[in-house]
Amino acid sequence: MQTSELHGSPSARIVFSNGNHELSPRRKQSAPVMDLEYNDDDTPTRAHRISSDVDAAPHPDHQATGWKKARYMCERVMQRKPFLNWFFVYLFMMIYFFSYRCVVMSVVIQTFGAPADNTAGTKFKGIMLGLLEDFVLVTYMVVLLWAVDMCIAQANAFKSTTHMNGCIDCCTSMETSARIQVVLFRVVRFFVYLMLFVICIGPFSADTILMRTRQMRFTFEWVKMYFNDKSAASNLQVAEEELAIMRKTVIVTVLYALAFSTFAVMWIDLSKWNPAHIVRPRGVRSTIDVNEPMLDLPESPAYSNLEQGTEQKIKAAELEESKQNRDSEAASRRWNVKDKRTWLNAGFVVIFTVFFLILMPVIVLALAAGTSHVVSNIGLNTTLNEPFRIWFKKEFPPSQVSGDITSGSNIYIHGATELYEPFGEDVLYRKTKGFRGQLAFDVKVDPKDPPNVLVLVVESFRYHDSQYMVGNNTYLLKNKNITVTPNFDRWAKRGIGFHNFWSSYRTSRSVESILFGQLPYDSVTDSGTTGGRKSVELSGMPQFFKAKGYHPMFTSGCRTDYDQWDKFLPAHGFDEVLSVDEFKALCEKDLGIDPKDWSGENGGAARAHSYWGVHDDLALQVLGNIMKNQTDDQKARMKKGEPKKPFFINHYTITSHVPYWDRPKWFADYKIPVDLSPLYEGEKEKDTIKRYVELRYFQDMALGQFMDRMEKEGILDDTIVLIMGDHGQAPELGTDNPEPRQMSCTRVAGALIAEGRLGKAAGMIIDDATEQYDMLNTLMDIVGVPEEGFIQSGIGRSLKRKIPFGERVVWSNNPAKKFAVIKGNHRIEYDRVSSEISVYDAQKDHDQKNDLYPSMTQDEKDEITKLRDAGRHLNMYFKERWEKKCILKESC
């Protein structure tokens, strides 16, 4: 006789008798019991072992204590409520995002908002928006993890009867091959979860680090910039406080990622549930004894006994017929239910996919766009924002203004002094035909014997290093009768000085402004030179001077692979580009420098910077030799009756580059004849300022020797020289983050020297606001526009022409900090989106402690708002046209 317990009737059992054979009424030995899960058509999908005794032996968690009991309880809860697998992934991720958003919130408000924005309401809105963005991102991640778990579950179902998740069960009695398979599956899951977790939180974590250290937002351009210029990464100046923030964030993030992945391997199995189960009836579950033989009813049993208190004999044929009828009815019902469930589940999956993966991100994007600038930045999840920014050109912070401008307005093109023909409406693309108006100064030029032109750009040369530039503002020089640049001052007094002269911070951005008359490309990480931009057509100084018959040449003792200058410069007008390698070769050939003396090691003379290139004392000697040779060649050609072919040279210096350590050995032993200690004694960054002013003095010495030599050899009589800083610096704030001192970083020294050509104008200082991008039109006005005109898209004006003070404004942008428009002596600061505006007196308030904007009249505020908006449109105009490669086109 064989017995089997009826499902749902623990006190009933069926006893089959076949005459001679009878099994025991109940097995006494232990046997594993399996837990079956069913599909929507009621067919079993897979089995889980849940017990080892048919007689209801106690579950292990009834006897276990401590950690084991907690683990068993967690397993049972996760098994009974499989949606908790998804819930715990959301919980893990949301806690991380929420915690670090709170940590960085104060910095975000300070960077992107005004003091009035530091309210509980603003913080609450930012947190709520952040939770929505985090939820969208985590949903994408959970779907990916679910797909991974489904794939692993399918593979696991064919190879192992153990759970996909777990910990020590693979150490129990199990065949070696099975154990290897189980361990392999779990190791793969661990690293997949770890990798996706890091991908999800990595950009967000990097963003929190940058915000807390540099008040900048992370984008994938930072990664691109690193690979483009990774050789320069070792020269990046990082403060110890910044390193501490970075270390702590990395450690916490790594530990959190490991904890998440470990928890996932032990308890989480996303394949057990998905949102489609919400609309499915609760699944049927059953238990069977896997060691009990499958019961096939005998064809002709003599009797079948039903024991339920009393025994009655029932014909087996009747029982089997009844079973067949029930199976047939159940099958029919299953097919009907299956069709309905299939359509219902499919519809729900479509709805879920469309709403949570498509519509919800769009809704959150719209909500972010409708919030204030500071709220959107509090809530910003960079990991989510970057794919939208790159793939769809949409960002969760409010979008910036368009690049639409009104080209006919004198606010962009100074029509009162420039004669031009526009090639379309609302574009800067035009043909300059000449210049007009009253002269501020004149430079005598014979069209038949045009002068050579040198544009000399000095590294980190801020205006208040020069006593001549500072003038009466001696508080910037500690009220001492002292100058760090006596040679520049001496030569500037013989030329035209630019007292209110501005740049856009960072060296590569000066190339765009000086050479091509543009507001530089708006990016914290990239510039107009990044990648070489060979496919972008430009028109500026190299093209202008080539059209005038000049030989355009770029020189520097510095390396030009940084930011891909070595690709950009030859592709945009320069016939020759000489940099560190060529300069070293010329130094060794013409100046007798021993190659071992480039380094300061092993007794070397440290004649070159450890990273950037040849120091300025040697580089300017080489430049002098180049100019001397070019001049001699010109004289020889003119004696033969051939065209002069003057040169246009753009030269960049390097020694005064941050962090101001590197210097030639001879200068390290040199005693500076001027006491510079009042400029740094008592300062917090005393050592940094000391190194800076010493190297500024060194560079000025080299500049003075170069100019004196050019005068002595008669080269200056036939050469117009423009000297200017590429940008400023603020050693008072250290070397790692000087930019908050905006005026020190963007206001630069500048002078035009034209020996014997200025007449009574020599010694003039222009006090009105000027910018690097004015140099293109100024030189065009001096040398003379070609008869056919010159095509350009710059925004500069000719400084040779006189205009009323304050009539014309200039823009000076630093994408990492603030944008600015300078009108007269007022510096107006703003950002890309928010309504915050600050106004400072650039002459009297160098450290920007007294904001004038609140005390201004409404009419003054309205005018400032118009200037701010015009600056934003202009900024986007150039950004869009750089990206669409249509700077010299009527439309994009």
Image (cartoon, grey):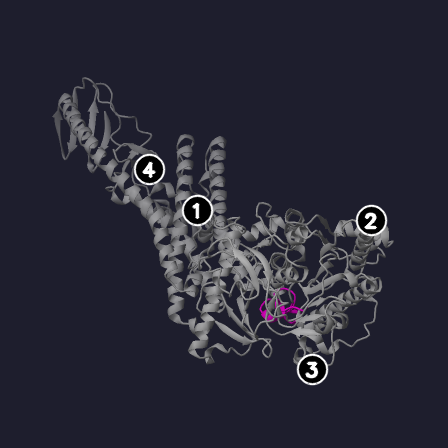
Q: Which residue is mark 1?
A: 264
Q: Amino acid at mark 1?
A: Ala
How far from the left and from the top, in percent, is residue 246? Answer: 57, 59
Residue 749 lies in the magenta-colored region: yes
Alpha carbons under labels 1 and 2: distance apart:
85 Å
Q: Residues within 10 Å of mark 2 (few under 14, many from 20)?
A: few
Q: Position of residue 213 (x, y in %)?
A: 56, 63
Q: Secondary structure at mark 1?
A: helix
Mark 2 and mark 3: Cα distance apart in space? 57 Å
Reading the image, the residue beneath label 4 is: 53
Choose the circle earlier in sequence order: 1 or 2: 1
Q: Residues within 10 Å of mark 1 (few under 14, many from 20)?
A: many
Helix, strand or loop under label 4:
loop
Is residue 611 visible to us here?
Answer: no
Per the model, the C-alpha gap separating discs 1 and 3 is 66 Å
Report the span colored magenta: 729-750
Residue 372 in the image: above or below residue 884:
below
Residue position for label 2: 640
Near mark 4 (Cα within 10 A), the count class, few <14, some 14-19 or many ≥20, is some
Residue at mark 3: 479
Residue 527 placement, left or right of 669: left
Tag 3 secondary structure: loop
Please say if the residues under marks 1 and 3 sit with CB atoms less than 8 Å apart: no
Residue depth check, mark 1 versus mark 2: number of the one nearer the observer: 2
| Number of the front mark, 2 or 3 | 2
Of the residues under marks 1 and 3, which one precedes in the sequence?
1
